[in-house]
Image: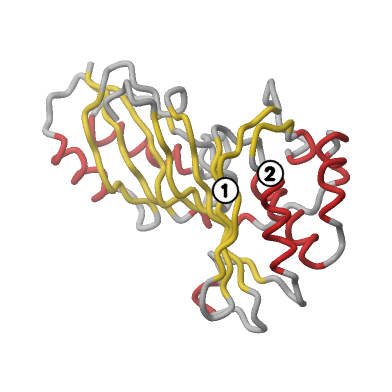
Amino acid sequence: MRTIKLVLEYDGTAYSGWQMQPNAPTVQGVLQNVVETVMNHSATVNGSSRTDAGVHARFQVAAFKTPSRRPISDIMKGLNAMLPDDIRVCQMDEVDPNFHPRAHAIAKTYRYSMFTGRKLPVFERLYCTQIRGRINLARMEKAAEYFIGTHDFSSFRAADCSARTTIREISESRFNKLQNDHLEYIISGNRFLHNMVRIIVGTLIWIGKGKMKIEELPALFERKDRRFAGPTAPAKGLFLENIRFKEDKKC
């Protein structure tokens, strides 16, 4: 059996997230159906990150196994011919048979896109969240530094999150101020809890608006209670940007 690795990008607007669901369209569901059609056999397509409903990806990694000896270029061409316009395979390779995109991922990077002006451009409405009213970016930048390191992120996960441990290590948490009233938040870590990035963003926006003080963050970590963190920021502003893997795997 060959293990085929795919690098994908997708617009998550029309999907109920990555993970397959019985009564809702998902990226994994669409991709797996197309893989089975092209390869002419049943297949399980595993992904590196279970992005939420409405979240986008510039760099998602998936993999499936096949006994077929078809050239990689032919398989990729067949998949892209059948996939909808909002999902695209950007790269495909044969990798180590034991490679698993989720188990072997060691770090992920997300980007959250925001607009701080008065009128959100029409063609960005599905990929950017508008922050209404004034914000203090300096406070938000300082607050972002508090998330770097190893912490218990119980206060920053969805109520239905079923992760066994809430300890996560964050290596990067920062803002980039862009032109034309655009702002982006970058966060990298070993793993993320359900809605974790969006709750962090919502909390940072609250701090920028003066609804929460930076000095409250240490206590928020200690409380381990979602009710005291900021709101969950909209999914449409979030992009999965990059995934890094263990060096001992051909990926």
- The quarter of the image holding the C terminus is top left
Give me the residue at 75% from left, 72% from top: 135
The residue that disc 1 covers is 187
Identify the residue at image location x=79%, y=38%: 155
**Can you tell which quarter of the image residue 69 is in?**
top left
Image vertical order of residue 38 relative to residue 137, above or below: above
Q: In the depicted view, which residue is nearer to us: 94 or 182?
A: 182
| Dot placed on the residue nearer the N-terminal end, 1 or 2 | 2
61 displayed left or right of 137 = left
Q: Position of residue 184 (x, y in %)?
A: 57, 63
Q: State which quadrant residue 191 falls in.
A: top right
> Disc 1 vs disc 2: which is toward the camera?
2
User: Is residue 31 at least partly visible in the picture?
Assistant: yes
Name the one closer to the observer, 219 or 71: 219
Question: Which colour scheme appears in the figure?
Answer: secondary structure
Residue at x 60% of width, y 49% of height = 173
Decide: few, some or many residues near mark 1? Use Cα within 10 Å; few <14, some 14-19, many ≥20. Answer: many
Task: Inspect the image, locate mark 2, and give the three-letter code of the amino acid beneath it.
Answer: Phe
Q: Quadrant of the N terminus?
A: top left
Q: Where is residue 232 in the image (x, y as percent from the top left)?
A: 73, 52
Inspect the image, locate mark 1, and give the three-letter code of the amino acid beneath it.
Ile
**Label 1–label 2 contact, CB within 8 A:** yes
